[in-house]
Amino acid sequence: MPERWVPERILRGQLAGAGVAAHVARCGDGVVLTGPELPDGPLVCRLDRQGPGGSVLDEPLAQAACGLMAVHGWGRGRRAARLGVDYVTTATGVALAQGVLAGLISRLRGRPTRGVTVSMAATALLTVSPYLAAGTADEPDPPVRLGSGYPPPFRSADGVTFELETLYAEPWRALWTSLGVPDTVAARAWRPFTLRHTTAIAPLPAALHTATEARPFAELTCAAAAAGVAVQRLRRHAERRDELAAAKPFTAPWTLQPLQPLYPINPQGGDGPQGGDGPLSGMVVVEAGRRVQAPLVGHLLGLLGAEVIRIEPTGGDPLRATPPMAGNCSARFLALNHGKRVVEADLWNPAGRRIVLDAAATADVFVHNWVPGKAAQLGLDHDHLAAVNPHLISAHACGWGDARGPHPPPGTDFLVQAYTGLADHLTPAGEAPAGSLMPLLDVLGGLISTSGVLAGLLGRHRDGRGRRVRSSLLSAAALLQTQLGGCRGPNGRPEFGAFGVPLPAVDGDLVISRTAPVHAVTAALGLDELVALPAEIAAYPVDRSLALLTAAGIDAVRACHHPAQLAGEAWAAGLLHHEHCAFVRPPWTFTA
């Protein structure tokens, strides 16, 4: 199936998961929804694929133009590297589903909504928004030093490649000192290791890799267990393929559990049309979480018009102080948290928990990404919240779901990447498998949790019942892996050709659409054969080759080497706004 229709397939699956029985018909770069559930007429959904210079974005062009190739490449010491999965296309499909669900909610609330347009470029920029904010802050991050240090994964003496994870410095230092690494070296490595999810680089000392490469995997596993550090072997494509074969492609990557009708039912949900902009204006979201998943859910619901109340520990979230600063707050933190109303509460104190319960009692949505069991331990799980607000949509965005048993390892992005075999899918044949240091699954997990919340709100409008929404990083990986893009060898490794990858030039990198006709490209550049393409591109500035290709009607772009560069690009001006740093505007446009 052509790549441009992957968003439609994702939309169909998420509509089915939301219980929406609409007829979906293709219409150019979009779809039209009709049926009995749309008595106010069709809902027209358009996908905007406009890129720089009038180009029409496909997966690799979107990755290149919006900075994903750059962020992914940093961790491997490159200016730009292609993600071997259709990441932007998948995220855009989820954003399209969000727009449709929000449009249907808007109609039920008495707001005429005839159409929604989703920008592929804005969706791509949302996935790298913390790096965009950090690079455009009042005192921006220094340039990324390519090739410095040695990032994960690690390798054992018997050839096993693996990831490590701990959220605390003491176990980290205990592991490495037990392996003979000097404590000063282990201590120096902690900061780049723990910040890798925000910086997308991990310049670790070579001594750490030397220590693991001197010991068999079984010995390393025992040492990690003794220190309290989680280990996850990088699984291969074949292992994950068997698991995915049992799943239904493009089904909703979240679950909805309606409350039993034990409480009074209000079919209108208690939230008719309100003043303000956005389909969710007048609704209230209470968000409690850290890092990416839950904050991204709150951020997206806020972009759709909801008021977001963010629960933070007494004294505020410590990530607020992480440089670079935009005004008096971390730019990376603000990328997902600006515009939220902050309420501080000590959740281990009864008074603090009462603050959260009181907020949830009058809210429409409660979302968190706490570790499994913490919500119940605090008395803030779905059952306790439903007792004070039976109409609440309660969402838990977790790491593993139920897949790893009652005592799973930390459900962090990098461990889930390793478990799901994404390393095979992300790196091309001929390179050692490695995950991305860009938190791909945290971002995609936040996107799909948002879709689940919108599906819950839509269902509540029908019967007045609250819902429990569950999603995971594991389900996000499954959604991404069920439509792997590009050519693949027998082991699932991407086998890129000359198109759709960064081609080095004198002053940067050029990326040509992966669907460009070979004969048209060679003719435009005056080549006799495709094999001469890399040398031809390398001999000239990017703009020279780009002009020749554009004149021949071939889509191509200059690869952005940092998302912050887009703040000065005319084509991206309408996608961003600036207040101490650059923020991404909503990817949806609703029309009445």
Image (tube, rainbow, N blue to C red):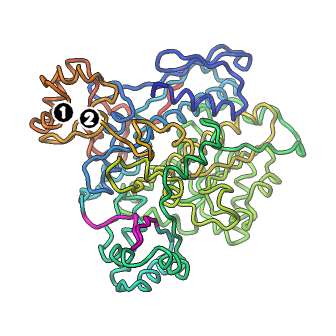
Residue drawn at x 45%, y 53% as measured from the top left? 439
Residue identifier under label 1? 531
Mark sitting on residue 208: none
- Where does the image place residue 236, in percent across and percent down from the top left? 49, 54
First-in-chain label (1 vs 2): 2
Q: From this view, report whether residue 422 is shown above or below residue 185.
A: above
- Where does the image place residue 557, in percent across and percent down from the top left? 26, 32
Residue drawn at x 68%, y 21% as measured from the top left? 22
For label 2, the crowd category at 10 Å Cα-Cα, with few meaning under 14, some 14 to 19 and many 20 or more, is some
Q: If the image is split into quadrants, where does the C terminus sit? A: top right
Element class at badge 1: helix
- Where does the image place residue 265, in percent across and percent down from the top left? 86, 38
Q: Is residue 293 left or right of residue 542?
A: right
Task: Look at label 1 and name its amino acid.
Answer: Val
Q: Nearer the viewer, residue 46 or 559?
A: 559
Magenta segment: 148-163
Q: Indicate whether residue 152 is drawn in magenta.
A: yes
- Any part of residue 170 in sight: yes
Q: Is residue 376 left or right of residue 200?
A: right
- Where does the image place residue 3, in percent across and percent down from the top left? 45, 28
Residue 140 occupies which quadrant of the picture? bottom left
Residue identifier under label 2? 498
Q: Nearer the viewer, residue 263 or 220?
A: 220
- Any part of residue 580 in sight: no
Q: Indicate whether residue 315 is drawn in magenta.
A: no
For label 1, the crowd category at 10 Å Cα-Cα, with few meaning under 14, some 14 to 19 and many 20 or more, is few
Q: Give how far apart the Cα atoms at labels 1 and 2 are.
A: 8 Å
Element class at badge 2: loop
Q: Nearer the viewer, residue 444 or 298?
A: 444
Q: Nearer the viewer, residue 288 or 472?
A: 472
Task: Look at label 2 and name its amino acid.
Answer: Ala
Q: Are marks 1 and 2 in contact (CB under 8 Å)?
A: no
